[in-house]
Amino acid sequence: MFTKITYVTLVVKDMQKSIEFYRDVMGIPVKTQMPQWTELSTEGTTLALTPETAEIKIDPSNNNSGISIGFQVKDLDRTYSDLRKKGAHFQMPPIDQGYGFSATIEDPNGYKITLTQSKW
């Protein structure tokens, strides 16, 4: 029935800071950019950003939204090193999870992002 997830939308506190993080730190190209909507393009899935409004609020100090983002990477050690040089804040350095290696980074809004290098 369903073949793939085409996009994920994150509500963000500061659109420009969030764009800079995903574009400049994470290296994800911007596909579309408007004041109320920005799309970043990864292979197969679009990551969309939209600013917080009076109706939709996030609490970056207590991000219990249930949202998590995961990216597959080819070389986790290199990605970890590159992102740290760009000032990324890691909550968990690369560790062996059995199925592969993973690390957790935090975006400017408090969203957790897992980077995984599969063993298979």
Image (cartoon, grey):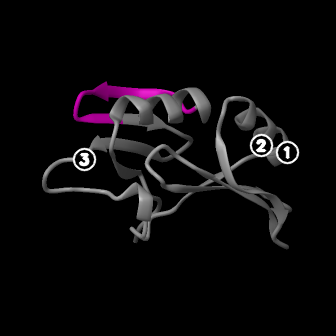
Q: Is residue 76 left or right of residue 48?
A: right
Q: Amino acid at mark 3?
A: Glu
Residue labelled with disc 3? 52
Magenta-colored stretch includes residue 30 = yes
Q: Predominant secondary structure in magenta?
A: strand
> Which residue ends up furthest to the front in the rendered image?
61
- Circle 2 packing at 10 Å, graded few (<14), some (14-19), many (20+), is some
Q: Amino acid at mark 2?
A: Tyr
Q: Secondary structure at mark 3?
A: loop
Q: Which residues are magenta?
A: 28-38
Q: Secondary structure at mark 1?
A: helix
> Residue 37: where, in percent of width, then height?
27, 36
- Circle 1 packing at 10 Å, graded few (<14), some (14-19), many (20+), is some
Q: Nearer the viewer, residue 86 or 67?
A: 86
Task: State how far apart marks 3 and 2 are (Cα).
Answer: 29 Å
> Residue 82: where, in percent of width, then height?
76, 33
Q: Quadrant of the C terminus?
A: bottom right
Residue labelled with disc 1? 77
Residue contact at pointers 1 and 2, CB within 8 angstroms = yes
Q: Image height check: is 40 above or below 64?
A: above
Magenta-colored stretch includes residue 103 = no
Residue 95 occupies quadrant: bottom right
Q: Nearer the viewer, residue 80 or 4?
A: 80
Q: Amino acid at mark 1?
A: Asp
